[in-house]
Amino acid sequence: MKRFFALTLLACTAALTACQSGPLDISSIAASRMSDEERVAAVLDDVQRGLHAHRIYKVLAHVSRSYFDSQGRDYAALQALLTSAFEKYAEITVKRVRPRIVVTDGRAQAFETFALSAEPTEPAVDPPIEWHGRVTIYLELVGNAWKIVEVGPIH
């Protein structure tokens, strides 16, 4: 159950902006033209696309190597958790409302409200997941990129 809780926490990081009509290539956006809040939103939107597509490295590209959460997971544990979840759940869907993003001195907090559902590959072995709640995602500016350093508990 804890591994699905962590998946939910990370999935919530993706829960940032309203649906867009097409994929957003973050690397092609001139950072100087976007506010820090918009850049954080773009990162979290890219994480959501990675979760929906089961692309672990698209998700992890936005997670700091120094990631550590309240459940005691570091970057490697998060990678293992996502690998397991992507194998066990054929479809992962995250719905979100526009969060509040606060940026101060190279640090950001995104206050997310979300709903997550996941359908198991083997329903006889793993239960479906239906979660909803609020979560805070913490990011830091590393060089010129925003990276997720922690995902708080779900409320």
Image (cartoon, rainbow, N blue to C red):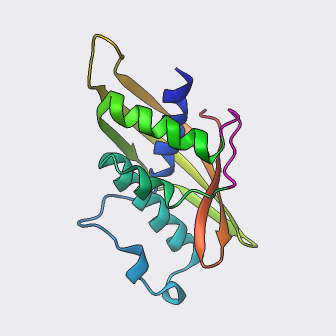
Q: Please, is residue 105 above or below residue 10 in the view?
A: below
Point out residue 112 in the picture as x, y percentages from the top left corner.
Answer: 53, 48
Point out residue 138 in the picture as x, y percentages from the top left corner.
Answer: 65, 54
Point out residue 13 in the picture as x, y percentages from the top left corner.
Answer: 51, 50
Magenta extent: 66-73
Q: Residue at x 52, y 72 (%)?
A: 39
Q: Which of 98 and 123 lies nearest the eye of the viewer? A: 123
Q: Residue at x 37, y 44 (%)?
A: 95
Residue sitting at the far left: 21
Give yes or no for residue 119 being in the magenta stretch.
no
Give yes or no for residue 71 being in the magenta stretch.
yes
Point out residue 49 in the picture as x, y percentages from the top left corner.
Answer: 34, 55
Q: Residue at x 38, y 82 (%)?
A: 28
Query: Image quarter for residue 63?
Result: bottom right
Q: Please, is residue 99 above or below residue 38 in the view?
A: above
Is the magenta region chiefly helix, strand or loop? loop
